[in-house]
Image (tube, helix red, strand yellow):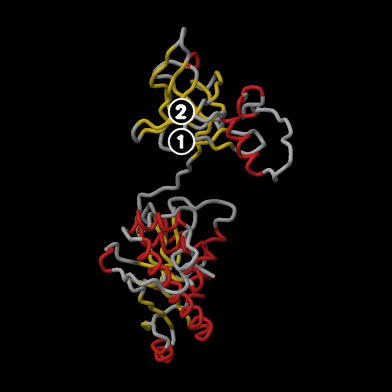
Amino acid sequence: MEISVERSMLRRRAMAACAATVAVGALALAGLTGTASADPAAAPSTPVAGAEGLSPGLLKAMRRALGLTAAQARTRIGEETRAAAVAAGLRHSLGAGFAGARVSGDAAELTVATTDASDTARITEAGARAVVVGHSLAELTSAKAALDRVTLHRAPKNIPVWYVDVRSNRVVVEAGRSGAGEAFLAEAGVPAARVTISQTNAQPRTFTDLRGGDAYYMNGSGRCFIGFSVKRGTQGGFVSAGHCGTPGVSTSGYNQQAQGSFQGSTFPGRDYSWVAANTGWTPRPLVNGYGNGDVTVTGSTEAWRARRSAARARRPAGTAARSSSATAASPTRRAPSPG
């Protein structure tokens, strides 16, 4: 089963409504894509069957992204679930002519595309809007698969994104340089008629977590360890020992990738510092467990206490706790070797 807007290598920014519907998973039943208004006043308030049992986290995300109440979110998801069921049935009955489906608007209006004009009556009878297009979904996914195969052993230069777009009935290839998209199609043997090439400045970028206990390096030489990650406003970083560096000293992560620089440091006497990280590093409330799983730490809880509390919560009633080493409390003694 395909989600009709499928991306490779790099996910573009999606509208908040689309992100919420994909998170639900109902649209994946029939390769659906969703677009929806963020106006809660237009959303119906009566829940629809199929939206029971939604997690509080999902409802919170939809409230934040779309401005919907819990009841409106349940209604939205229920309608999209119903649309997905109709689309799944049409996908089966239309066979090779099926060209994808999508929902739009607060009422989750279903649009189903086909390459065969004789299918329109069947689509309409099922309660969907029919659109006749030139390429089936199978043809588009086959074209994308051919592009994927080209990249099995090497990433294409200046091509950060390609995906199937049901709405335009094309495979979209985003290229960072003129001519790069055409060369990509030629190498894959994909007909240009199935593809839309658009220009973009986006490039793939990786992100790495900042965790307590992870090693880092100062000016590419000496090694210290992250105490815990922090945020100062929107600036992410971490707290460490003051003797590790002075303001302006650059740092690289355990993976030897550029990480940030010291912004403040106190030593001797007191011994603490803080490092501002660049945008490739994300502060996380975690402490490296060195093979025993990361420890989640919130507030002022010490990592070893957090691990012990988690173990106690998992232990069956009446069983005794076994002693174990406080691995996260002594990371310097169990740190992996550099590199």
Determine the image quadrant of residue 293: top right
| Label 1 Cα crowd, 10 Å radius (few <14 / some 14-19 / many 20+) | some
The residue labelled by disc 1 is 283
Say whether residue 199 is left or right of residue 275: left
Question: Considering the numbered disc 1 on the image, is that residue within a helix, a strand or a loop?
Answer: strand
Question: Considering the numbered disc 2 on the image, is that residue within a helix, a strand or a loop?
Answer: strand
Q: Is residue 252 above or below residue 281?
A: above
**Nearer the observer, 315 or 269:** 315
Say whether residue 297 is left or right of residue 170: right
Instruction: Identify the image quadrant of the C terminus.
Output: top right
- Amino acid bearing label 1: Pro
The residue labelled by disc 2 is 238
Q: Is residue 148 above or below residue 286?
A: below
**Mark nearer the N terminus (2 vs 1):** 2
* Mark 2 touches mark 1? (CB < 8 Å): yes
| Rendered location of residue 13, percent (x, y) | 38, 54
Q: Is residue 175 above or below residue 263?
A: below
- Amino acid bearing label 2: Phe
Residue 85's label in the rendered image is none
